Image: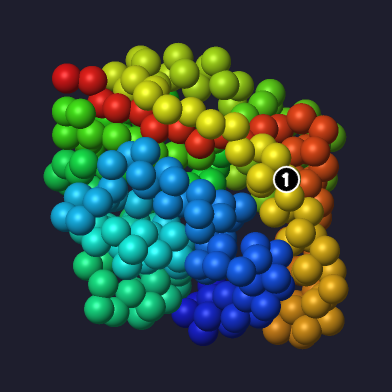
Amino acid sequence: MSRDDRRSLVAALRPAQQLAFGRGEYVEQESFVRASEALALAARAGIAPGVSVLDLCCGVAGPGRFLTRKLGCVYLGVDSSESAVAVAAERARGLRCRFEVADVPPLPSGTFEVVLLLETLLAFRDKAALLEEVARALHAGGRFAFTLEEGLPLTEAERARMPAADTVWLTPLDQLHALLERAGLSVGWEEDWSESHGEVAAALVDAYAADSTEIAARIGQRRLDDLLAAHELWRDWLATGRARKFALVAERLP
């Protein structure tokens, strides 16, 4: 996707997303995380003025830019998409933000006080390798703040219905805890966000459908169809408990 295509995608979806998230909760996020939830997670992780934050799979970095502006952290966002990083960098002018285009893992060199990963842990099939790299990138006592898409792996029938199913790898909560412990990361805080994110998913489905003519004209009908299909599945899975959403903060042990 080119930089212009990425800008067009963000602009096309913005009106529906602003409506779905509600007043004060939309910050150009490409996820179900509300702005107030991002702030709550940041507080639990100790993000504050001068704290170094590494944001993995940042996309256009809406939440990262929001947290940097609100909290004054020193921010590095990493994403494999050159176009997303270009848009993020354009919109972060004047903020203490840097960006790198890179695949994850490995993680950038150096250590950080906080590693942030919002709504993309499910994209990593090999979570053990990722968590080992996260632990390496944290100072002793550093915090890994992230969201988890929790549940049993998708069935073949479910994978056939989910667009880009090769980026959807659900993980049972007890398995994730074991992987964190093995990597030297101890969970200090955990909260179930399933209900909240189910509400956002349902609101996004309704808003995208209501604005479908305008969105399709800007991004194409096939991309819109895939977007709706994925959001409808998440809406249904979160409503029925097929999948759950958790926010967690884990500390790197000395």
Location of residue 148 with respect to 216 vertically, above or below: above
Q: Is residue 223 left or right of residue 138?
A: right
Q: Residue at x 47, y 79 (%)?
A: 3
Q: Which residue is mark 1?
A: 198
Amino acid type of the residue tagged 1 in the rendering? Gly
The reply to whether residue 58 is in sight is yes
- Label 1 Cα neighbours within 10 Å, binned few <14 / some 14-19 / many ≥20: many
| Residue closest to the eye, 101 or 233 | 233
Residue 9 percent across, percent down from the top left: 61, 76
| x then y, percent, for residue 236 | 82, 42
- Is residue 101 in sight in this rendering? no
Horizontal relation, residue 139 to residue 125: left or right: left
From the top left corner, tell me how far across and down residue 162 is, in percent: 76, 46
Give the vertical position of 36 relative to 94 (above or below). above
State whether residue 64 is above or below residue 12.
above
Residue drawn at point x = 67 percent, y = 26 percent: 151
Q: Secondary structure at mark 1?
A: helix
Q: Name the quadrant of the C terminus.
A: top left
